[in-house]
Amino acid sequence: SGYTMGPGAINRGVELALEARPGRSTVVTGSYTFVNANTDRDAVVPGFFRALNVPRHVASVVATRSFGTRLDLTVEVFRSAAHFINYF
């Protein structure tokens, strides 16, 4: 999700998600995604077959705490692996 497959694209991966409720007013969710996105053509850079703009690893953790019925506090931590960017 978040990118378009082009001609010769080979995409495989895994997505995992977990939700926990450690208390009545607290929800913690976490997710992890691994994407192995390659091409069978070196269309952009000669000899380079990795898909551009697609990180191999992405992880996030979101914690939400409710304070009564009118106030929620949410904290999110997001981490993306280094990836190659196409500026054109």
Image: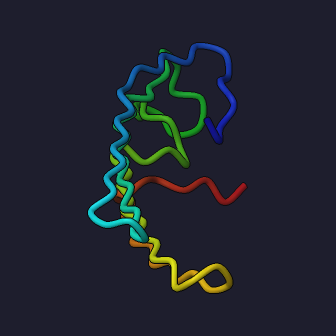
Residue at (34% x, 35% y) in the render: 16
Q: Quadrant of residue 14?
A: top left
- In this figure, what is the number of numbered marks? 0
Q: Camera-side residue: 13 or 66?
A: 66
Please indicate, yes or no, whether residue 59 appears anywhere in the rendered image: yes
Q: Is residue 64 above or below residue 15?
A: below
Please indicate, yes or no, whether residue 63 appears anywhere in the rendered image: no
Q: Position of residue 31 (x, y in %)?
A: 37, 48
Q: Residue furthest left?
A: 22
Q: Camera-side residue: 68 or 55?
A: 68
Residue at (39% x, 55% y) in the render: 29
Q: Position of residue 80 (x, y in %)?
A: 39, 59
Q: Position of residue 53 (x, y in %)?
A: 55, 49
Q: Quadrant of the N terminus?
A: top right
**Color theme of the render:** rainbow
Residue at (42% x, 54% y) in the render: 83
Q: Is residue 63 above or below residue 73?
A: above
Q: Camera-side residue: 68 or 43?
A: 68
Residue at (49% x, 21% y) in the render: 39
Q: Position of residue 25 (x, y in %)?
A: 43, 71
**Is residue 7 found left or right of 18 in the rendered image?**
right
Q: Quadrant of the C terminus?
A: bottom right
